[in-house]
Image (cartoon, grey):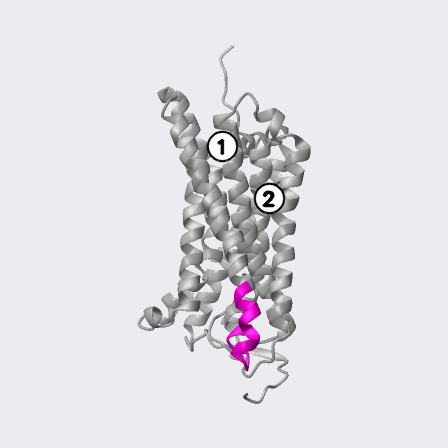
Amino acid sequence: MENSTQFTSFILAGYSDSGHLKYLYFILVTVLYVSIVFANTVLIVVICMERSLHEPMYLFLCSLFVNELYGSTALFPALMTNLVTDVHAVSTVYCYLQIFCMYTYISIEFSNLAVMSYDRYLAICYPLQYNVIMTPNRVCILVCVIWLYPFVTITTALSLTIRLQLCGNVIDKVYCDNYLVVKLACSTSDTTVNNIYGLCVIVLSVVVTLFTIMSSYIKILTICLKYSINARQKAFSTCIPHLASMLNFTFGCFLTLLQSRFDRPMRNVPTVLHTILSVYFLMCQPLFNPIMYGVRMAKIRQAFKNILPVGLYPKRLTKH
């Protein structure tokens, strides 16, 4: 066994020497983060203030937007700081905290999208029973499960990582990654439990939720084909943002998994592109969702107009 050391910090080796371009990158990342915070906060406020949006679908959307703020805050402040500094070291405490936040963000995102697909399935396939099934109490329970389940599973996973004896402290990414920390363990036999538990979490948090999402939309599609053209278009208009969000997030997570688990396919990728791909799921998704739902969903657009100050959105003059 190699000599283990009690490290107090980790070195993030994913940052390259970009010279004066680092200030340009800093500005771009800052603008992106401000846009994410603004877009998601606006939609959260709109849903909370507009009583007509106090329905299950929009409450689940509100939970999704809160998660976008949560996940992006786990990455962007540290990323902006490290872009303009020469030393890319983070304390072990902060590194584990970042791992916890980012992994719970991923799990919450998939769980939230799965619940939203189930909600659309009930609304479209069982419209008469929908209000009986989706009661306020049940919605509250589902939102609690969406958030509590990931916190429990990731806390357990992180506790298994913290117990490991490490023989290195260099992480080849711009943020802390649980799998890369586990790879730093001195003994591979110590990581067996981590790998088995991690596989179980991936199956339950990702595979099961993706299966739920896809089966829900297959059933919705089957039912919609029996509807009239107008009813079909209305059903599709509420489903398209959900499907687009799911595909975009799954694609981003796949890119991250590809980079973490398989080094060879990414060796010839330029450093800047490699970095962008590694944070795609946390850079694109938090901005993609509010734009997609805000633009595609008519009730949100109308609610946004209703709460805007009169001076910003003048009413049309009507003839008397």
Residue 24: x and y, percent? 43, 66
Please check the rendered image and state whether residue 189 is part of the magenta-colored stretch, yes or no: yes
The quarter of the image holding the N terminus is bottom right
SS class, disc 1:
helix
In the picture of the structure, the residue carrying the numbered disc 2 is 63
Q: Main secondary structure of the magenta part?
A: helix
Picture layout, residue 214 above or below residue 299: below
Q: CA distance from mark 2 to mark 1?
A: 19 Å
Q: Earlier in the sequence, mark 2 or mark 1?
A: 2
Q: Is residue 141 left or right of residue 315?
A: right
Picture layout, residue 272 above or below residue 227: below
Q: Which segment is the magenta one?
A: 182-196
Q: Write the residue at 39% across / 21% down.
A: 227
The image quarter in which residue 10 lies: bottom right
Q: Residues within 10 Å of mark 1 (few under 14, many from 20)?
A: many
Q: Write the residue at 60% across / 62% down.
A: 100
Residue 318: x and y, percent? 50, 16
Query: Which of these two is toward me, 1 or 145?
Result: 1
| Residue 47 visible in the displayed image | yes
Residue 272: x and y, percent? 38, 68
Residue 203: x and y, percent? 50, 54
In the picture of the structure, the residue carrying the numbered disc 1 is 121
Picture layout, residue 126 above or below residue 2: above
Q: Is residue 21 left or right of residue 197?
A: left
Q: Is residue 292 left or right of residue 7?
A: left
